[in-house]
Amino acid sequence: MKLMITKDYQEMSLLAAEAVESVVRRKKNALLGLTTGNTPIGMYHALAEKSRAGELNMRETHIFSMEEYLGIPPDNYQSLYQWLNRVLIEPCGIASERVNRIDGSAPEPQLACQVFDRTIESMGGLDLVVEGIGTNGHIGFNEPMSPPDSPTRIVALSSETQTYNFAYWDELVPAHGITVGLAAIMKAKEIVLIASGSKKAYALKQALEGPVTSEIPASYLQLAPQLTIIADREAASLLTIDKEGGFPCPHSSV
Ligand code: PGA
């Protein structure tokens, strides 16, 4: 486990973009499991910028979008697929056939989830997963009480998640989502967890320093073989583990 504490959001975003870039440089057709939300925006902007400048070629990567709202068609502006499309897929020139989205409006969504997991498996598993953390310790939409071997599935969004996501919706926040399961996340060859701001500090502390428990799904990441946490100073403010020498902290700029 590697913990990188950055002075601010900007530095967190650049380091996260570098982590993605280094996987893509090693394997140009890498399978990337990518999250949505406020935290990764800066990282996606940095990757889009490098692509536009011709410094990075992501055209051959395979993108797996990690979460979606149930019942929201992919062409809906508010679908998480469209969000990822706007911030990363289009700017980086990634062809749509290389993008694996969870279809929130599939006639048989449960079947679509199984197909999604089988696709990941048949392509050799995810090379890199980038995840944020929810204030309730969720990753993706794996809400508290998600088991570590959970498949991609339909989930009821917690009231905390719905309240948090309210800003993204002018009307009612969907009550259900579809999330890549913890099983596929935990099997990824590398996981990067990003966190920014004091509102994430307690969840991050519970995830990294608390017991491994389904009450805090992100705590399962303690068991992941290749985990890098990139957190800005505010998000890392409650951590004691690096000060005790628990993790190597090579990039800490605090
Ligand atoms: P955020 O969400 O990046 O919008 O804070 C993170 C998450 O809920 O996983």
Image (cartoon, grey):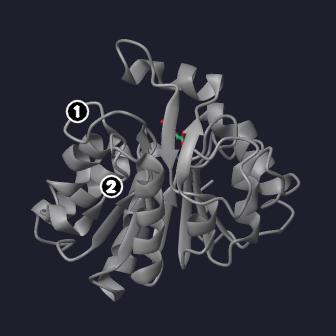
Residues 251 and 188: in front is: 188
Residues 11 and 202: in front is: 202
Q: Is residue 208 left or right of residue 94?
A: right
* Residue in view at x 33 percent, y 40 percent: 105
Q: Is residue 205 left or right of residue 79?
A: right
Mark 1 vs mark 2, CA separation in Å: 13 Å
Q: Quadrant of residue 97?
A: bottom left
- The residue beneath circle 1 is 76
Q: Which label sits on residue 232?
A: none
* Residue 193, position as x, y percentages in the image: 57, 57
- Tags 1 and 2 touching, CB below 8 Å: no
Residues 148 and 20: in front is: 148
Residue type, mark 1 in image: Asn
Q: Which label sits on residue 101?
A: 2
Q: Where does the N terminus fall, quadrant-wise?
A: bottom right
Q: Between disc 1 and disc 2, whose residue precedes?
A: 1
* Residue in view at x 45 percent, y 25 percent: 174
Disc 2 element: loop
* Residue 38, position as x, y percentages in the image: 42, 37
Ligand 1: does it lie within 8 Å of the C-beta at label 2?
Answer: no
Crowding near the residue tagged with mark 2, few <14, some 14–19, many ≥20 C-alpha atoms within 10 Å: many
Note whether 63 is above or below 162 in the view shown.
Answer: below
* Residue 62, position as x, y percentages in the image: 29, 71
Residue 4 visible in the shown view: no
Q: Is residue 137 left or right of residue 20?
A: right
In the picture as drawn, the residue positioned furthest to the top comes out as 171
* Residue in view at x 82 percent, y 59 percent: 241
* Residue 4, position as x, y percentages in the image: 60, 62
